[in-house]
Amino acid sequence: MTRMNRRGFLDRSKTSALGLGVGLTVLGDPRSVRAEPANDKIVMAIVGCRSRGPVLARNFASREDCEIAYICDVDTNMIEKHTKTIADCQGGKAPKGEQDFRKMLDDESVDAIIVATPTHWHAPATVWGCQAGKDVYVEKPLCHNAWEGQQMVKAARKYDRIVQVGTQNRSAPYNMAARQYIADGKLGKIHFVRVLNQKLWANFPMRENEPTPKGLDWNMWNGPAPEHDYNFTLRYHWHHLWRYCIGDLGNDGAHQFDQARMIVGFDLPKQVYCSGGRFNTEGAADTPDTQIATFTYDNDLVVTLELTLYTPYMLKIDPDVRNGDMFPYWPQVATRIDIYGEEGVMNVGRMGGGWQVFVRTKDRQPVVEDQMFGRFPDAPHQEDFVQCIRSRQKPNADIEVGHRSHLTLHYATMSCRTGGKTLNVDPETQHVDDDEAMMFFKREEMRKPWVIEQDV
């Protein structure tokens, strides 16, 4: 058995094209990347400061070549909560606070914005950021619907902006090594890929409307979604409501589906079918808790993405595995990819966990043909974004790459929402051949003034 270890791959990548997207700093502290003079720092603004936003803010603020100049959130309480933490990360220099991030866009000193809002705000913030001359790091899911993704690509190209999608797996050395392993033919011809997204995320009750909490601009939070009075359930459970999101197939599942696209190398499908639904109906959630999507490709490849939200025994890879030289117990990894080749099956972990290739058993015991440990790829993904801002090269998770992954997942939700229709994809228009399904390609109407124009 030949084992591809992480250090060996990085050493080899120094002199190979494969390594160009991975800085030699991925193993260390991101602050050690470079010691920039103050006037050469990349000036950034965070848009959205709950959950993922503060993590990204701290990460970028801790770099010596970046500065967080603004922290923007529709809830002023979040601005107050995180300002000091960010200031502590950058030598005491506190960012300015803005409840309406559009005011920040007028500041020409801001080079880039980090979009970590709920999904329904990703597209407007990205498009407006590009129009204002800012580079953008936008979290997944990329957009509320397929049309918005198209507009984000148009804006990035029209204004010549660097737009990195927060699908960090594209910057992980172990994923790049897996891609090379398959490109070298070591797994043989691949006809089937299975992507899993399984967890426990129970349904939730719909609470009564309430007065808007102090400090929150609820009208702006609701943004392009249909008008609604303030409601706690909408604000804190938006991941599972069609008015705000794509459902968990495209929310959490986008990570490992995009990762599978990267490793195996498939693009847009020619045909999509998705069945499932919300089977636990005791609550307010209206996106599915059970789904299986099947994507058929021209090169004799079938890919499935399977979703269950009632499986507490299926577990994400824990931090000890992500940050250590060990592998997870694959049968109960909730966010894994199984790649079936003619020579063996490759199990791949998301956000670390590495990969292993299994061939035919011997004496009823598993036989590992090859393997590589993995690490959580946040730091290298952010490093890639920073370096691409300077070089103007497309980043590892370029907006068009991210769009094509999310577009495919939007096809799946379009099929599911029309009762499981089989949809044929036109790769030129990116439309499907069913009028009912196309009703979900774009939001019926974006609520003014939170509108993306056709001509971005």
Image (cartoon, rainbow, N blue to C red):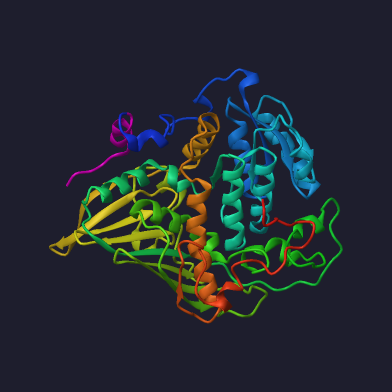
Q: Answer above or below: position of 68 versus 170.
A: above
Residue at figure coordinates x 31%, y 44% from the top left:
177
Q: Residue furthest top?
A: 37
Q: In the drawing, does residue 248 fall left or right of residue 339? A: right
- Quarter of the figure with residue 38: top right
Q: Answer above or below: position of 420 versus 4.
A: below
The reply to whether the magenta stretch includes residue 132 is: no
Q: Nearer the viewer, residue 204 or 21?
A: 21
Q: Residue furthest left?
A: 363
- Quarter of the figure with residue 55: top right
The answer to whether residue 60 is visible is yes
Q: Which residues are magenta?
A: 1-14
Residue at figure coordinates x 79%, y 56% from the top left:
449
- Quarter of the figure with residue 374: top left
Residue 245, given in percent of the width and then of the height, sits at 62, 63
Residue at figure coordinates x 72%, y 31% from the top left:
108
Residue 265, given in percent of the width and then of the height, sits at 35, 54
Residue 389, given in percent of the width and then of the height, sits at 55, 33
The answer to whether residue 289 is visible is no
Residue 423, given in percent of the width and then of the height, sits at 47, 74
